[in-house]
Image (cartoon, helix red, strand yellow):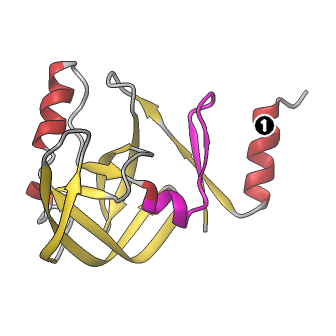
Amino acid sequence: MKTPADSLTEFLINKSYFKIKMHPIASNHFKIISKINGVKGIFILDTGASTTFVDLKLEGKFKLTTESSTIKAHGAGRDKIDTLLSKKNTLSIGGWIKKRFPISLIDLSYVNDAFESIDAPAVDGIIGADILKKGFAVIDYEKRYLYLKH
């Protein structure tokens, strides 16, 4: 007998969605394996983040070409965070691929320090609402899947 989750998966796949596994971590976030410019990384899904970010220290790892940005990022705290911008990147999450995708770079050491204090793995970046909007995202929290439409 089909479960509602099976029906959801079947429905979304028939609508050209890609099914992407989300892995829970100790911080209560979900970890998603993604590739930027062909390089695999560990990202957390943050529905409250407006933008997708990569740690500033990983510019070379992900083959990012950056330029200065006047945009300041805002986190849960009051401080504004300096950013760099990298345009025209290829981003892939599971079978979902976006070309010419802009990615912001920020210092994520405060995030990774917090994760280390609770024995959660360090992350390379954050998957934000920009991807969720572009991919018409559906999140199945119970079965731990993210669906993105191409």
Q: Nearer the viewer, residue 36 or 51?
A: 51
State left or right for residue 56 relative to residue 99: left
State left or right for residue 42 relative to residue 128: left
Amino acid type, residue under disc 1 in the picture: Asp
Residue at the spot 46% in from the left edge and 61% down from the top edge? 131
Image position, residue 21 (x, y; %): 52, 41
Residue at the spot 59% in from the left edge and 32% down from the top edge? 141
Label 1 sits on residue:
6
Above/below status of 87 relative to 115: below
Image position, residue 56 (x, y; %): 12, 58
Which residue is farthest front? 78
Image position, residue 85 (x, y; %): 20, 72
Residue at the spot 17% in from the left edge and 43% down from the top edge? 78
Q: Nearer the viewer, residue 85 or 122?
A: 85
- The magenta segment is 130-147
Report the number of numbered marks.
1
Which residue is farthest right? 1
